[in-house]
Amino acid sequence: MDANSQSTPMPDASLLQLLHEDLQTSQQLLALLDEEFAALQARDLHLLEKLLGSKQPLLATLSQNAQVRSQTLHSLGHSPDATGWNAYLAGHAQAEDLAKASQQLEQQLEQCRQANLRNGRLINANQASVGSLLGILRGAETPSLYDSRGATARIAQQRPLSQA
């Protein structure tokens, strides 16, 4: 047996452990993102603040573990990307387990990205709504009003609601 094949079980086990840890972490993150969506819909600021505090350590763990995997691949002479990962997996005893866990993690992280984008769209919509309402209250924005024919009415002068 050569030196390279003797050293592979440790990185395999370590990488598999990191992947399983990240699978659990990404499941927790996805659950928090779903809770965040519900809190955004309810505009529950206290819950949003709590969820943000819960998300930070999960994101830090995912980032740290990704960095360890990249460093491990690099130290073994592979690039820290999909090509390097596939080259590493070629011929390893746990290649199937590693590939399966990696694919599951990739799918879960994509679900997290999609949930995060969904939450971002809701945040943007809420910000636009609040901004529009503030503009109306300040008198800087003309609300869309309709006349008796259903057309948009033109109002010559707008005053802030506080002066109406």
Image: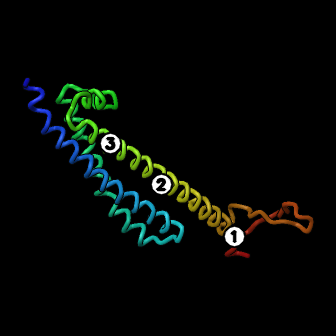
Residue topped by disc 3: 100
Query: Spatial distance from mark 1 to mark 2, Cα to Cα?
Result: 38 Å
67 shown above or below 130: above
Q: Which residue occupies 35% across, 46% down? A: 105
Q: Which residue occupies 18% across, 39% down? A: 12
Ranked by sequence position, the earlier of labels 1 and 2 is: 2
Neighbour tally class for label 3: few under 14, some 14-19, many 20 plus, Cα within 10 Å: few
Looking at the rendered image, the disc whose residue lies closer to the viewer, 3 or 2, is 3
For the residue pair 48 and 153, the one nearer the viewer reads as 48
Q: Secondary structure at mark 1?
A: loop
Amino acid found under the numbered disc labelled 3 = Lys
Residue 123, position as x, y percentages in the image:
53, 59
Neighbour tally class for label 2: few under 14, some 14-19, many 20 plus, Cα within 10 Å: many
Q: Quadrant of residue 78?
A: top left
Q: Quadrant of residue 33?
A: bottom left
**Contact (Cβ within 8 Å) of mark 1 with mark 2:** no
11 shown above or below 39: above
Residue 5, position as x, y percentages in the image:
12, 28
| Residue 115 - label | 2
Residue topped by disc 1: 160
Amino acid found under the numbered disc labelled 2 = Ala
Whether residue 18 sits left or right of residue 124 in the image: it is left
Q: Secondary structure at mark 2?
A: helix
Farthest residue to the top: give it.
2
Amino acid found under the numbered disc labelled 1 = Pro
